[in-house]
Amino acid sequence: MTDNAASSVGPLVTGSEIARLAGVTRAAVSNWRRRYEDFPAPAGGSATSPLYAMSEVQAWLEKQRKGKDVSPEVELWQAMRAAYGEQMLKGLADVAALLAGEGTPGPPDDVASRVRELLRTDTPADVVNGLAERFMDSARRSGSDLVTSERLVRAVRHFAPDLPAAATVFDPACGIGSLLLSVSSEEATVCRGQEVDADSARFAQYRADLMGRSDVRIVAGDSLRADQWPDLKADLVVCDPPAGVTDWGREELLLDSRWELGTPSKAEGELAWLQHAYAHTAPGGRVLMLMPASVAYRKAGRRIRAELVRRGIVSQVVALPPGTATSHALPVHLWCLRRPANTSAGDGSGMVRMVDLTDNDPDASLEPRPDQVADVPLIELLDDTVDLTPGRHMRALHRDYPGEYAALREELAEELGRLAALLPPLGSGGGSGPLDAATTSVAELARAGLVAYEGTEPVSTSDQLDTDFLQGFLRSSVNARRSTSASGTYRLDGKGSRVPRMGIDDQRRYGTAFRALSEFEKRIRRVDELSRRLAEIAREGLATGALTPEK
């Protein structure tokens, strides 16, 4: 529910929320808006996304007794669930065929009678769109990836280019047609699709026919193994391919001419679909491909990604917000490709636009902020990994190199200044070491109750023993050998290690020196880390132009 505190009419609701209140589909709510003159007028929002006063909606539903009883739409869906069970796609296709006047053999009598009852108030197009919407909603709630989610459809539409008059749009894995019919909404557009599931393809075709889309043809079949549109060249190819499928036909398709960018490995089925889509793209045409985020960096696909970049084919990669896909919350990428209009020379910009929307709400605006966009030169992408993950390049572009360089340089100078002061003053020992004189083992100290362990670190539990003295001698080279196992593992608490026998004052004197050395080593490690980071930032900053040598 959308709560607009500034509205004087109270909470506002969307069409989707009205549908949930009444137990109907959004198509039914749209139908009410057209059929009933007294349906509440929008109280906010926009022309494409109106908002309604919830109090007015509830009053209207009460007056019309909408939502009080099970709606005819819900009754039809329940009857279909009972008749078809897990074969709802067949049910959708059978009902769509009945609506188109071609229901032979048609759905069961109970389903058919409810369809005829619904047609007393709704058009066949309203009924078929309502069923498609209900199927998509059930897939969303079950986490199924059988259909392209509404959020993904919205994202593809947002980033799709303007199409020329009488353009051709193709979807080689069109499912029930949601993506294809949405992107190619103009009546003059020629739409072609293929779908491996025969019931999905049948429903998609009937749905287009009932919507009056005579320009749409959808056929059944496996696009990779049995392409039904071998001569088709489209102005725009859109595709939400099967993800993570290894049995895509690599063995029988090894010599296929579609692999002009390289033969995909068995694990890179998505890159086979991408090249299939590209093979069906006309010169100057575009491809919008939904991809798992891992395709952007997996080692097996590096050579194909490199060819995409080298030839200037990939123009944009968009990391969509988490939650955009139905079946998981992981980010999904939208790859935007272009086939050069001039085959003799590339006509790209020499850049790949990276868009990172992974911090955004999936239902919020898809228009990126300036800090979410990076135009990356092709040469920077052609490294050992050819990683096309937008976030990786966003951080590099929007990094504050001058600020980071200055801050790290100052911190390094401070650390270097502390180092000399940390070293303890040490004089000549003038003889044998303390460990060559009388000593005692850590095991003996433990049995006497003078030592306890904090994790693996032995510490003193008595004012007769100084902890820094103890640990300092345990780290000596002599004790390190005693504490190293046959496998090469070093343990500071080795029971065979020995420490000198000396009074507490002498222990503290040694302990102070050992403590200063430990702090010195800690600072040295910090200096080493700062030095590496400083050199990395300086080198990258100079290479990208973010930093320049002083004159």
Image (cartoon, rainbow, N blue to C red):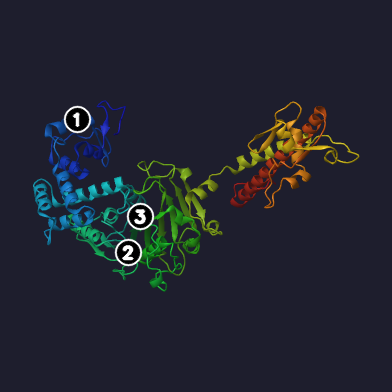
Query: Tags 1 and 3 in contact by the CB under 8 Å rule?
Result: no
Q: What element carries label 1?
A: helix
Q: Mark 2 highlights which residue?
A: 234
Measuring from the top left, give residue 388's x and y in whole percent. Answer: 48, 55
Is residue 151 positioned above or below 425 on the image? below
Which of the two discs, 2 and 3, labels the residue nearer the N terminus? Answer: 3
Point out the image quarter for the N terminus: top left
Residue at the limit of the structure toward the front, as seen here: 447
Left or right: 278 as drawn, with respect to 311: left
Looking at the picture, tell me which residue is in the foreground, 220 or 205.
Answer: 220
Is residue 413 positioned above or below 319 on the image? above
Any mark on residue 393, and which? none
Alpha carbons under labels 2 and 3: distance apart: 13 Å
Q: Mark 1 highlights which residue?
A: 56
Q: Mark 3 highlights which residue?
A: 161
Residue at the limit of the structure toward the bottom, as seen here: 255
As shown in the figure, which amino acid type bears the numbered disc 1?
A: Glu
Residues packed near mark 3 inside 10 Å, few (<14), some (14 to 19) or many (20 plus):
some
As shown in the figure, which amino acid type bears the numbered disc 3?
A: Pro
As shown in the figure, which amino acid type bears the numbered disc 2?
A: Ala
Left or right: 362 as drawn, with respect to 445: left
Alpha carbons under labels 1 and 3: distance apart: 39 Å
Looking at the picture, tell me which residue is in the foreground, 177 or 236.
Answer: 177
